[in-house]
Image (cartoon, grey):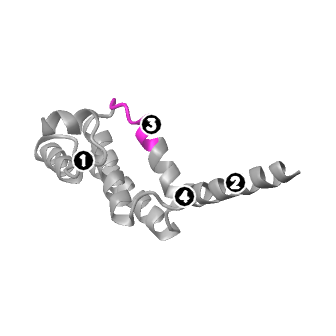
Amino acid sequence: MRFALIATSAAAVVAVPLAVAAAAPQMTADQFLGAVRCAAFEAAVDPRAELGAVKMQLNAEARRQPAETAAQAQAEARAIALQAVIGESGAAGSKIASELNAACSDGLLMSGAAAARAA
């Protein structure tokens, strides 16, 4: 009986902080918005980029962020995608590539096209 009480208490001491950490945002709002911008620019530059895992991670983080931050991130991602569709050629394409480098310069989320440009 004593063992069960001790084991339950120990499990609660370990589980409660883990549950709180899992529910709390893992990134600041600025880090989250920067990562979303980076992923959006990378998808605009290379539509075949392997961003499935990154998008899944960002979607999970969006659920932890305040609603205003998640809505802002969604709006910025849509604006970047629209910008890419409207200006797919010439100077607009190079502008998007330079914005990709700027958005991904902190190294939070460099995969595919961004990593190749940074190297």
In the image, what residue occupies the spot 13% across and 44% down?
Answer: 94
Front label number (1 vs 3): 1
Q: Is residue 30 above or below residue 56?
A: below
Q: Which residue matches tag 4?
A: 21
Circle 2: element type: helix
Q: Nearer the viewer, mark 1 or mark 4?
A: 4
Distance, label 4 to label 3, CA atoms, is: 21 Å
Residue 82 shows in the view: no
Q: Nearer the viewer, mark 4 or mark 3?
A: 4
Q: CA distance from mark 1 to mark 3?
A: 16 Å
Q: Residues within 10 Å of mark 1 (few under 14, many from 20)?
A: some
Amino acid tagged 3: Ala
Q: Which residues are magenta?
A: 48-55
Outermost residue to the right? 1
Does the residue at mark 2 contact the one at mark 1 (Cβ under 8 Å)?
no
Q: Give the residue number, with chain letter if any, for mark 3.
A: 53
- Residue 30 percent coordinates (x, y): 33, 64
Q: Is residue 51 magenta?
A: yes
Q: Which mark is residue 107?
A: 1
Q: Which residue is mark 2?
A: 10
Place residue 28 in its image quadrant.
Answer: bottom left
| Distance between the alpha carbons at the discs numbered 2 and 1 | 38 Å
Please tell me which residue lies in front, 78 or 1: 1
Lower position in the chain sequence, tag 2 or tag 3? 2
Q: Nearer the viewer, residue 111 or 24?
A: 24
Q: Is residue 54 above or below residue 102?
A: above
- Can I make out residue 21 in this image? yes
Distance CA(mark 4)–CA(mark 2): 18 Å
**Lateral position of residue 2 relative to residue 25, left or right:** right
Residue 33: image location, x then y, percent: 35, 59
